[in-house]
Amino acid sequence: MAFDNWGPQDLSAPAKKQLPEVAVQRGMVLEDVQSGWVGEVTRVEKSGGMHVVSLEDRRGKTKSFQLGFGFLLEGQAIRLMPPAARPAAAVPTGRTASGSVKVQGQRAQVAKASRIWVEGKHDAELVEKVWGDDLRVEGIVVEPLHGVDDLKSAIADFNPGSGRRLGILVDHLVPGSKESRIAAEAMTVPGAAGNVLIVGHPYVDVWQAIRPKVLGIEAWPAVPRGIDWKTGILTAFGWPHETSEDIGLGWQRLLGAVRSYADLEASLLGRVEEVIDFLTVP
């Protein structure tokens, strides 16, 4: 016989009810019980060690609330939980993040004279994250240019030739753009023909090469003309955006969502593979 339950008890008190735990999702309509605020989930982020959800009401106004108890979903009280962790994009066993067969037991080669040039640090970090294993096997180094305005002079200084090739990845390389004119002029450098390959993607910045669904959005936000693109993107996300440090931290959050080639747009994948082939195929 159990004696622990003996003694005075309030038999009229209702039995404790375990609230259902529901992972928050974009598009979900919730009501905050305490304030009566009703809105659609537009953003979820972790701030100060806690998860915060933004609810947009029918007038377009937004308020943020800490996840947990105190929400109604379709009239039912719930405990609002953080979003379920997104599983890493499937990379077959024995393959690198780029999808190539992983070479086991081989040390990285000594760097060759040939190089991959990209516009900036963020481009270099993205290429390294997805293609780094492949490039170390091939002995190819990725270097940021910090802009392509002086690309012609940079190529001339590199002095391309047999066994000393350049593969260059340029942002926003589309017909009629400033970048397309710079690329055409750069290819007039002596030794460039046959030893330099300039390719590009159509995006304003390499950030856009990350597939939106990987970030939990339908499309990248539109940034009005006259506003710095990266600043505009971080502003639209509701992330800090005022300093260069904010920009760097914002990029690290985006880069952290990339697990493999499957998280990137095909228009970037094809160009990087083209450059690697150009530098490694005799």
Image (cartoon, grey):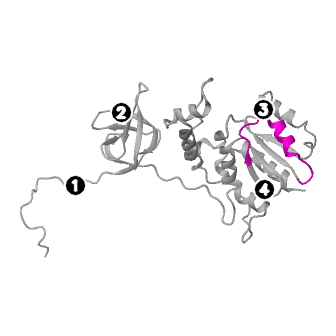
List the residue tagged with mark 2. 38
Q: Give the range drawn in magenta.
A: 143-163
Which one is closest to the eye, mark 1 or mark 4?
Answer: 4
List the residue tagged with mark 4. 140
List the residue tagged with mark 3. 179
- Distance from Cα at disc 3 to Cα at disc 4: 24 Å
Task: Report the number of numbered marks.
Answer: 4
At x 77% / y 28%, what residue is drawn?
178
- The image shows residue 218 at horizontal and vertical percentages of 57, 38
Instruction: Establish if 154 lies above or below 280.
Output: above
Q: Are circles 1 and 2 on residues that touch, CB within 8 Å?
A: no
The answer to if 155 sits in the magenta stretch is yes
Mark closest to the chain's N terminus, 1 or 3 = 1
Tell me if 169 is positioned left or right of 242 in this view.
right
Between 92 and 258, the one lying in front of the other is 258
Between 14 and 103, the one lying in front of the other is 103
Q: Quadrant of the N terminus?
A: bottom left
- The image shows residue 92 at horizontal and vertical percentages of 66, 62
Instruction: Establish if 190 lies above or below 93.
Output: above
Mark closest to the chain's N terminus, 1 or 2 = 1
Would you identify the image quadrant in which residue 54 lies?
A: top left
- Distance from Cα at disc 1 to Cα at disc 4: 63 Å
List the residue tagged with mark 1. 16
Mark 3, other Cα within 10 Å: few <14 / some 14–19 / many ≥20: some
Amino acid on which disc 4 is placed: Ile
